[in-house]
Amino acid sequence: PFKRPSAPDMEETLGKHRQAIAKLAQSGDAQKLVSMLKQTGGVQQAAQAAAAGDPAALMAMMDRLMHTPEGAALVDRIGTQAKQAGLE
């Protein structure tokens, strides 16, 4: 049966994930990805809409970016870095 993790265990895991996400967000690849998204325009509005529960515009931007060789390579490297950091 499923064993629900204790609150301290969950807090510890969340803390580790926050640290890993913060480190990943500061990486050169993540910064380049943000830069590429900003070049397309509208990223601020898309991010705000996603934070409010409507990710469609941001997902469309990412989809277009991932169809470029450079964008696909960046997303692949960031995914690898996330897995190495324990974020799957």
Image (spheres, helix red, strand yellow):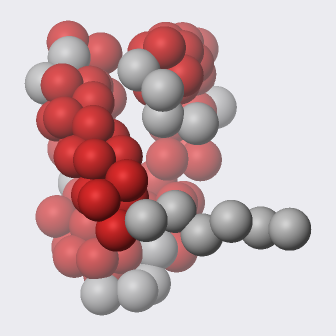
- Residue 59 coordinates in the image, percent (x, y): 52, 60
Q: Note whether 51 is above or below 22 in the view shown.
A: below
Looking at the rendered image, the quarter that the C terminus falls into is top right
Looking at the rendered image, the quarter that the N terminus falls into is bottom right
Residue lying at 27% horizontally and 37% vertically, measured from the top left: 16
Question: Outermost residue, right direction?
Answer: 1
Pick whichever, 41 or 59, lies toward us: 59
**As drawn, is 70 to the left or to the right of 69?**
left
Q: Is residue 63 visible?
A: yes
**As drawn, is 64 to the left or to the right of 30?**
right
- Residue 86 coordinates in the image, percent (x, y): 48, 26
- Residue 44 coordinates in the image, percent (x, y): 16, 64
Residue lying at 46% horizontally and 74% vertically, measured from the top left: 55
Pick whichever, 80 or 68, lies toward us: 80
- Residue 45 coordinates in the image, percent (x, y): 21, 73
Q: Is residue 46 visible?
A: no
Q: Quadrant of residue 37?
A: top left
Q: Note whether 45 is above or below 22 in the view shown.
A: below
Count of number-bearing discs = 0
